[in-house]
Image (spheres, helix red, strand yellow):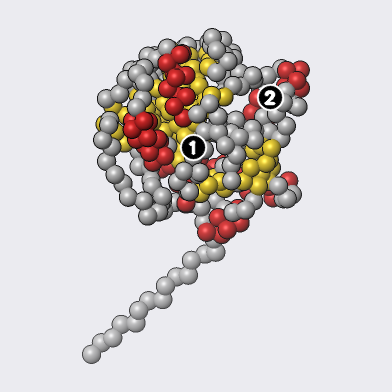
Amino acid sequence: MTTHATPALRPLRDFHVPADQITEGPRLLRRLPEGAVSRPYELFGLVPQAATIGAEIRGLDLSLPLSDALRDELTRALHEWKVLFFRGQHLTSQAQRAFARNWGELETNPLLATAGSDEVVRFDRSAVPTFENVWHTDVTFRERPALGAVLQLREVPPAGGDTMWADMAAAYDNLPQQVRERIDGLRAVHDFLPGFARFTPPERLAAFQEVFPPVEHPVVRRHPATGRRMLFVNSSFTTHVTGLGRDESDRLLRLLFQQAHVPEYQVRWRWSAGDIAFWDNRATQHYAVNDYGGARRVAERVAIAGDRPF
């Protein structure tokens, strides 16, 4: 009987993968909190746009008042899908404000241009540079950042000008265990200056330094309605992690900022004039894509006042 020796495996050469970088492989894409049961929606149609984030709502006219039952079901959809899209609404500014008020008092932002009302912020790409091409969460430099926002496109370019949103609960879920253990309980400083300095004259910035002093928020916040843990740092407004040296803080923040760039956590919306996006500002980051050259793009946003992150 002839026997054959198994050839020895050639050892792999030494290699190193940094423990704090994004790596290939499967991702946990969990739309609902652990243990939650998915239920159908009874008062409107809902068409998912991505695995964990983004749903188009069909069959509603947002210019009409909402019943309590409809408001509650939209709230559930917002918590579950994090950003809701409504096509072809063409709301007046008054109707846009009225829709947003179903979820609380409206916020004003003296740093931004407005459209007929202090509560309606106007982004006109033909007039001045706007806040595009960066992942961010709105107004985290406030002690109580916005709960959410209702954005309507008034004019769209012939091509391009999409907006993207990222699910920051999915981003947290997929961090390595050692990173989650490291950041739970940490706090970070948020400041309006880094995000606004590129577009605002220094003398105007100086006038608002006392109005908007730096604030601290948890690096990982809990959603007040669902209880989910979510990353709550962003590259526009988060300047450093409290208690860490500059180099260590910068490296940790680069890792956390990078999570919004993962396509599996994202949804992308291609606008038509009159479309509405309503997003949960506590659970998402967003990115306005400036890929439309010199064409005109006009958007108006109403923000809903939020609570203190915990």
Q: Nearer the viewer, residue 223 or 124?
A: 223
- Residue pushed farthest left? 1
| Circle number at residue 238 | none
Q: Which residue is mark 1?
A: 284
Q: In this image, 4 relative to 268: left or right?
A: left
Residue count near mark 1 (Cα–Cα under 10 Å), binned few <14, some 14–19, many ≥20: many
Label 2, label 1: how many angstroms apart (C-alpha)? 23 Å
Q: Position of residue 135 (x, y in %)?
A: 54, 33
Identified at 29% across, 44% down, the residue is 39
| Circle number at residue 197 | 2
Q: Position of residue 62 (x, y in %)?
A: 36, 21
Q: Position of residue 10 (x, y in %)?
A: 45, 70
Looking at the image, is mark 2 or mark 1 earlier in the sequence?
Answer: 2
What amino acid type is highlighted by mark number 1?
Answer: Thr
**Residue 263 appears in the figure:** no
Corner quadrant of residue 15? bottom right
Identified at 26% across, 35% down, the residue is 42
Q: Nearer the viewer, residue 229 or 23?
A: 229
Corner quadrant of residue 59? top left
What amino acid type is highlighted by mark number 2?
Answer: Ala
Q: Position of residue 12 (x, y in %)?
A: 48, 66
**Residue 46 appears in the figure:** yes
Q: Is residue 30 shown above or below 87?
A: below
Residue count near mark 2 (Cα–Cα under 10 Å), binned few <14, some 14–19, many ≥20: few
Identified at 55% across, 64% down, the residue is 14
Corner quadrant of residue 277? top left
Q: Is residue 69 shown above or below 62?
A: below
